[in-house]
Amino acid sequence: MRHFLIAFCLLFGCLPAFAFQQPIQGKVTDSADGNPLAGVSVIIVGTKTGTTTDINGHFSLPVSAAKEGTELEFSFVGYNSLRKSISGQGPVMVQLSATSGENSDVIVVGYGTQKKSDLTGSVVSVKADEITKVASTNVMESIQGKVPGLDITSGNGSANSAPSVLLRGHRSIAGSNGPLYIIDGAINDHVEDLNPNDVASMEILKDASATAIYGSRGANGVIIITTKKGQTGAPKVSASVYGSSIHDAGYPHYMTGPEYVAFMRESYRTTGKWSSPEDDSKIFNASELAAIASGTWTDYRDLLIHNGNEQNYKISVSGGSDKTKAYFSAGYNRTKGLFKFDQNEKFTARLNIEHTISKVFKAGLNSQLTYYKISTESDPLNAANKISPLGAAFDSTGTVINYPNNGSQISPLVNEYIANNYADNTNTTRVLTTGYIQITPFQDLTLRSNISVGLSNSREGIFNGRYSIARSGSDPRSQYNTSRSTNLLWENILTYDHTWALHHLTFTGVTSYQTNQSDNGAEQGDGQLIPAQSYYGLGNATSGLIASTGYEESKLVSFTGRINYSFNNKYLLTLTGRSDGSSKLAAGNKWAFFPSVAAGWRISQENFMKNVTAISDLKLRASYGITGNDPLGAYATQSLLTNISFAYGDQSAPGYTFSSQIGNSALKWELSGTKNIGLDFGLLKNRISGSIDWYDTRTKDLLLPRLLPSSTGVSSVIQNIGKTRNTGIEIALNTRNIESANFKWSSAITFTHNKESIEQLATGGQDDIADGWFIGYPVSVFFDYQKIGIWQTDEADQAAKYGEVPGEIKIKDQDGDGKITTSDRVVVGTAAPKWSGGFSNTFTYKGFDLNFYLFARVGQMINANYLRFKSGTTENQALHDYWTPENSTNAFPRPNAAGGVQYLSTLQYVSGSFLKLRNVTLGYTLPEALMSRFKMSSIRLYVSAVNPLTLSHTKDYDPERGGSENFPMTKSFLIGANIDL
C-alpha cells in the first residue's frame, strides 16, 4: 500500500505549481454549528494560487516562502467572504458565517446548475458525507429511505444483488418504471458500477418541471450523479478500507426429523391409513424407518448457509494546477455471500481530468472502468426446503449421498460437495467515458459539446454435472453465453446566463443524439464426458447442441430549450420544451413534444416578512409538465419471424412462423402529465428546514401488452391503451437539535405516501383478471379467495354446505350466494406500500460521531413462499400450526396425504410491513494535533452494523425480500478506516 501511495504522489508531483513547496494547512468550519465546510475557495491574496476544502473542511496550500502576514481569502456560496493573515506555523483555523436569509446551495440540475433558492421544481440533493454514512458497494443502497418519494428495496441477500429503485410509484405496465441515471452528463443504466466514495453529490429530480428537459428519458424521474473532481493545490491522497462479517438476517425454521414424522403421520391419520407408530411401515420406506429408529435426520439448510465476509479498499489522488486538475481513484471489493458459490469481485478505476486551454477554451475527460468476476449460486435452498430431513446427508466415508433414503429427490448438497459438478461464472467489463470541450466566447455565453461512450462485454459460463441439482441424474449440460453493447450519446449544450438590474435570465439549448446497439450469443450442449472441462468443453458434447445469436439497435434524437427567469430574487419562472424522436415507434408517431412550466414565489423575501424572524426561508412552488415512455424492446412495431421444424417421415425441413407477439404499426408514445405543488421552508435561522410536496401524475396511452385470441395465431400485441394515476405527499424535515461547543445532535426525517392506481384498461372499465390488472388498484396486486379461518368441529354442518369438513380452509363467501365460486375472489392486498419513511440521527462529541438510521415500509403485502402448505406429498416445509382434532387452530388446515385441500394459496399472504434499523455507525476522528505530528490530515476509525434489527409480522424472515425463500437477506458487522494524507 505504501508503494502504491508513493507512486501516485510522484505522478502528481510533476505538476510544477506545487513541486517542493511547504504547504499551509488549515480547516474551515461553519461559525453557527462548527460543522466542516466542503468546497470553500481558498486563495492567496495577490496571486492565482488557490485550492478548495475537502469534505472534512481541510485545505492545503503550497507556498514556497510561507511568510507571516501572508493573507488568505476564503469564499463560499451562501457565506460571507473572509480574509485572514498567516501567523506562526500552526494550522489556520477559519470560521465562516452564513449570509443572512439566503439559501444559496448550488444544486446540479439537467444540463447545468442552479442555486437552491432559485429552484422551481421538486429536487432533492444528497451530498457525499450522507452517502458514505452507510457502507455499501451500491450507491443507491446508501440512500435508502433518505429521499421522499424514492422507494428503494433490496432485491435479495446474494453477493450479486442490486436494489430495486422506483420514484413516485409505477406509471407504466409494459414500459420502463426505473429512473434515468445521469453520471457526469452521461446516461448509464449501471449505477452499481460506481464506487460510492467517488460520488460528490446526487440530485434526484422528481417532478415534470425538473425532468422535462430529459423528455421521454425522464418520465420516471432522473437521478443525476456528479463524481469528484480534481482541485487546485497540492496532491491529496485519501484511502478507505473496511472489512465485515456477513450473516443471514433470519430464515424460517423448517421441520426437523421428529416434526416431519409427526406431520406425515397426521397426514395419513386423516386418510385412515395411520393410527399408531405400528403403522409407520405403511407410510415410510425401509431407509426412513431406520432413520426414525436411530433418530437420524439432517438440517440441510444449516449445511448450506455459511457466514460470509466482505473486503473493501479504495484509494484516490486529487490535485492540480491553475490549468490542469485531475482526480484518480481505484477500488477493489470482494463479497463472499452465504453460499459456497455466491461471490462477487469488483474492480473499479476512475480518472477525471479538466484542462483550461485558455480563457475561452476548456476540455475534460471523465472515465470509469469496472470489472466484475461473479460466481452465482443456483438456489440450493429451494431443494433443501423440500427434501425429507430423515436420514444422513453423508455416508460413512464422508461422501455426500446423492439420493438420501433411497428417495427420488437429489440431495441439495451435491453442487457444493461434489467436485467439478457445478459452476456459474460471469466476467463483465464496462467502460464509460465522457469527453467534452467547452467554449466561452464571452462572459455570459457558454458552448459545450459532450460525447459519451459506454461499452460492455460479458461472458457467462454454466456447467451442471450429471448429479447436480439441475440435472438430477440426466446428462451433464454446458452453456456459454456472451453479450456486448455499445451506447453512444452526443450532446451540444448552449447556455446564456445574464443579469441586469433586478432580472436574471438563463437560457439552455440542447441537441442530443443517442444510439444503443447490443448483440448476444448462446451455446448449449449435453453429455460432456470430462466434468473438469466444465463449460469449456462444449465441443465434446454428445447431444443437444444448440446455438443462437441476437442483435438489437435503437436511436433517439432530441432538441431541447429551457428558460429560467427570476425577478428581484422573489419571483421565479421556468419554461421547458423538448422534442424527442424514437426509432422504437411507428412511422408517423416517432416524434413527441414534452413541455413544462413551473413558477416559484420566495415569500420570505417580501417586505411584509422582514419582521417575521421565526421564518428564515419560505418558498412556494408549482409546476405542470408532460413526459413520455417508449417501449422497452426495440421492435414492438414489427412482426418478427421465428423458425420451426417440420417432419416428413424420416426427414425434417426448416419452416418459419410469426413470433408470439405481433407488431403494432401504429404504436406511439406513452404520455404522463404531472402536477406538483411544493413548499420549502426554514425556521429559526434554519435550525429547522424542510419541504412538502404534493403531486398528481396521470399517464395515458399506456404501452400495454394485450392478449389476443388463440385463433389469431399469435398471443399478444403491445398497444397504446389504458391509463394509470399516481398521487402522493412527500415530506422532508431536517433539524439541528443541539449545537454546543463540544456536542451536536441533528436529525433528518422523510415521509412518503403514494397511491398508484389503474384507471383504464383495454377492457374499458372492466378488470383484466387474466393479466391480474384491476381498475382502482396498483399494478401489482394479489387476487385470490379470502381466508377467514379453519372450519372447526362445531361448524361441521355449516362447512358441509360448502362441501368442506372440519380442518379445511374457510373462505369468505363474498356474494353471499351460499357457495364458493370464482366470483368470490377479491384483491386481498398489494405489493405497493401505503407509506414509507426514514429517521436519521447524528451525534458528535469532540472527536466521536454516532449515526443511526431507521427505515420503515408500511402497508404492503407479500406472498411468502415459506408459508406454503403441502400435505399430499413427501416434501418438507416450514413448521406450521396446523389443525388436528386435538389442536383447533385457525392458522393452517389439517394435513391430508390424499391431497384435495383447497385454497392453499390463501395461506401465503401476510403483511410485509417492517421497521428496520438500517445502519448504526460509531466513529472516532484522531485529534488534529496528533495528525499534524505525523503530517497527515485526518484518520477516522469506525465500526458499523448494517441491518442488525428488523421488526415485522414475519418470524425469522425479512419481508423486504418480498416473499421468496432463496438468498435470505443479510446483516453485517464491519470495522473500517478513512485516511486523508
Image: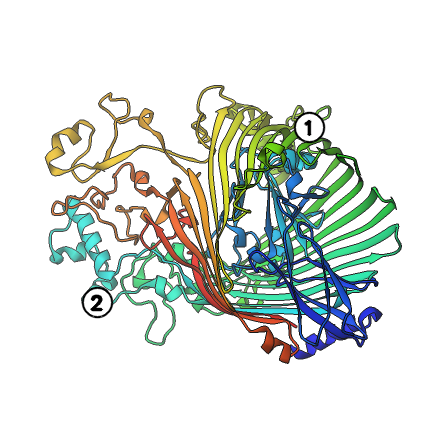
**Between marks 1 and 2, how big is the CA–CA gap?**
73 Å
Residue drawn 20% across the image and 44% down it: 894
Looking at the rendered structure, the secondary structure element under dot 1 is strand
Residue drawn 31% across the image and 62% down it: 406
Question: Position of 977 compared to 434: left or right?
Answer: left
Task: Give the number of the disc on residue 295.
Answer: 2
Residue drawn 53% across the image and 66% down it: 531
> Dividing the image into 4 quarters, which one contains the N terminus?
bottom right
Q: Which residue is mark 1?
A: 595
Q: Picture coordinates of residue 664 (x, y %)?
A: 64, 26
Residue 965 visible from this viewpoint: no
Tell which of 292 and 649 is nearer to you.
292
Q: Is residue 447 above or below residue 472?
A: above
Q: Amino acid at mark 1?
A: Pro
Tell which of 206 and 887 is nearer to you.
206
Q: Amino acid at mark 2?
A: Gly
Tell which of 487 and 566 is nearer to you.
566
First of labels 1, 2 by sequence position: 2
Quarter of the image for residue 364 reads bottom right
Q: Picture coordinates of residue 805 (x, y %)?
A: 17, 35
Task: Give the number of the disc on residue 191.
Answer: none
